[in-house]
């Protein structure tokens, strides 16, 4: 399971995410967690941690998108899917 853990500034959401991670781990799932640097509350529950730099709470999704897109690209490649589809998309867009 891939988890994006909200930063500590969003305490209510952070607590719910920790609870959700504990629940899926109790059912045998492996977890990869994207977590803000310095947040040690997730370490006992994550199989793999990806540490994100500390940024203001509203910018956290922008920081998290980069490792998520890299993960999606690597996963698609590992599964044998062509990540460059549809090819030459810019050429098929008509500009008036």
Image: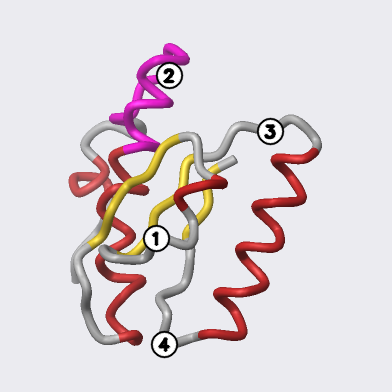
> Residue at 61% across / 85% down in the picture?
12
Which residue is label 3 attached to?
29
Dot label at residue 81:
2
Which residue is label 1 attached to?
40
Depth check: 71 or 32 in front?
32
Label 1 near label 2: C-beta < 8 Å? no
Q: Is residue 28 magenta?
A: no
Find numbered disc 3 in the image and state the secondary structure of the residue it sits on. Answer: loop
Residues drawn in magenta = 71-84
Counting residues from the start of the chain, the first of labels 2 and 3 encountered is: 3
Disc 1 crowd rating (10 Å Cα; few below 14, some 14-19, many 20+) is: few
Depth check: 26 or 78 in front?
26
Q: Residue furthest right?
A: 27
User: In which quadrant will I find the C terminus?
Assistant: bottom left
Counting residues from the start of the chain, the first of labels 4 and 2 encountered is: 4
Counting residues from the start of the chain, the first of labels 3 and 1 encountered is: 3
Left or right relative to 45: residue 25: right
User: In which quadrant will I find the N terminus?
Assistant: top right
Which residue is label 4 attached to?
9
Q: Position of residue 95 (x, y in %)?
A: 19, 65
């Amino acid at each position: 399971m891939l988890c994006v853990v909200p930063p500590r500034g969003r305490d209510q959401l952070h607590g719910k995410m920790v609870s959700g991670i504990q629940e899926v781990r109790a059912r045998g799932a492996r977890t990869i967690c994207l977590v803000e640097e310095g947040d040690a509350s997730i370490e006992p529950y994550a199989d793999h941690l990806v540490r994100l730099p500390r940024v203001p709470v509203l910018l956290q999704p922008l920081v998290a998108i980069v490792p998520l897109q890299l993960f999606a690209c690597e996963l698609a490649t590992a599964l044998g899917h062509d990540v460059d589809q549809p090819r030459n998309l810019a050429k098929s867009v008509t500009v008036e």
